Amino acid sequence: MRAGPVSRLVLFLPAILYCAVQWKYTATMGASTIFSSSRRMERADFADMLNELSNATQTACRANPLTRLFFEDGDKALPYMKLSGDRLGGCSTVRNTNVTPFTKVEMEDCNVTFIREHIPPDTAELHMDNTLHTRPWIEVDRWFSSDGQYGFALYRHACLADNGRDVTHDE
Amino acid sequence: MNDDRDQWRYRIFAGAAGLLVFALAYVNRTTFPFPWNDEARFYLPALWWAEHGSLSPANIHAPSGIFWVPDGFTIFIGLALRLFGETMQAARGVCECAVALGVTLFALGFRRLGGSWQAGAAATLLLLAPPVVFAANMVRMEAPLFLLIAVALLLHVHRHALAASAVLFGSLLFHPALGIAAIGYAAIVCLLPGSLLPARRASGRSIAAMDWGLVFVVALCALGEVARIVHHWGLFEAHMMFQASQKLRVPLREKLMRPQALILLMSFATVATLLWRRHVYPKLGDMRDILPVAGIALGILIYSVFGDEMLYDVYSLSVCPALAFCVICRDFGASAPNRLSS
């Protein structure tokens, strides 16, 4: 049952073929594509978003040092933000998950600032539509990248939202 | 002399394959895949562990602990964060390195299992593909699991079946994806006579000690995890119910109508053919070498197909086809019989 060099080399044919099929059909997985031509721009947009989000959360914390920053389960930016040190001015940061959601009482705390992000492959509109919570939410900050792919919005309960800061500025 | 040179050339190839995957992953960081919420779910508990030494991550609103996955990955990444700095880049770098090292170890294992450099190199080609890069670029359990499968394969081809079983069962401390594979491998190894015996070497005693040492470490860690689960039984039940409801959301028929299911079917056919060939040609070589590997491949494939997540494509589209391909190479004349025993 020993094979000669030729039949050994024949092994490579199916291997190369399967490898090529993998590259053809799995080069796009989900919404992302390997060696996507726009990857440099996407990376820059994400970095901009992190920077803007960091600034926005710091502003919220400076305005009210008791602020609790709540990130939803769709959050992708929090792990990339520098959390240690004094960056968030002592504000606490919590992110929920599908398994450990925020309770209604926690959400309706007047010191809560809720953060919603928009990063590919998100297609949903960026707005506060959680019907569980009865109090009105006010958008206090918002940012979008130039191509509209990356963005975020900060919301606050009406009980504490400062009308003076209730400004929406798209970029 | 030539054998030595060939061996070195192949080692260089194996190292280069690992480096290539690392480079592919590095170039596509945060764009293949995009940052996603799963990373936060697994990175933040690790960050909490690195900072507070606690498995009750308040930063993801789980002050009593998380029980929808075991704690192995949290501690693995937590250790990396302590060593290399508490950043996402450090965590991602460790996952990339784990997969790159895994590719190199797979290549070495494939050569021994396949019995020739051609078989090894051809099987390794199957790993130089987007699903592997995808797994390397995620801060998720797929990266360490990929490495653990490679380690188990390498231990198997060096006739350390007990240690390989321990590694596969130890992977359950990270994620249940290799659970069926671990049971399948252990069952096959126990049923095939002589499989648990380590290779005969001058340092035979130390090899056996390594096998038992691994078993002991895994058993100790598993005991710790079980104790933690028992202590938080109510929470564990609730989290598992949630997981089960998520996994059962997609109808079975839909899961079976995918290319991954076809690969599973083909792998079953391959194993059936191997068994049939042994029956017809009893001199074909030792089943101890290939059947346990086929058991690993099938076990992982079954989990991947029924788990039905894109994240498992690294197993179902790359790792398992590569394992199956290597087994076929071994069986269909690309190697000398009973090579592992030599």
Image: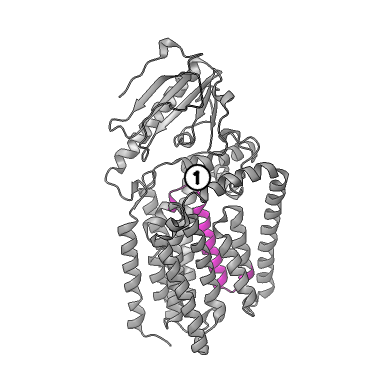
Q: Quadrant location of the N terminus of chain B?
A: bottom left
Q: Please, is residue A115 above or below residue B193 in the view? A: above
* Of B199 and B263, the residue lying toward us: B263
Secondary structure beneath label 1: helix
Residue B68 in the image: state x and y as whole percent.
Answer: 59, 46
* Residue at (43, 29) in percent of width and height: A116
Residue B5 appears in view? no
| Drawn side of residue B203 relative to residue B22, left or right | right
Residue B331 in the image: state x and y as whole percent.
Answer: 46, 80
Residue situated furthest top in the rendering: A164
Residue A37 in the image: state x and y as whole percent.
Answer: 26, 46
B340 within the magenta span: no
* Residue at (68, 71) in percent of width and height: B208
| Drawn side of residue A45 relative to residue B3, left or right | left
| Drawn side of residue A51 relative to residue A170, left or right | right
How many discs mark residues in the rendered view? 1
Q: Amino acid at mark 1?
A: Ala
B150 within the magenta span: yes
Letter of the chain that mark 1 sits on in the rendering: B
Dividing the picture into quadrants, the one containing residue A56 is top left
* Residue at (56, 53) in percent of width and height: B175
Q: Quadrant location of the C terminus of chain B?
A: bottom right
Q: Which stretch did the figure color magenta?
A: B135-162
Residue A139 appears in view? yes
Q: Which residue is tagged 1? A: B91
Crowd tier of the residue under label 1, counting other residues whose Cα lies within 10 Å: few below 14, some 14–19, many 20 or above: many
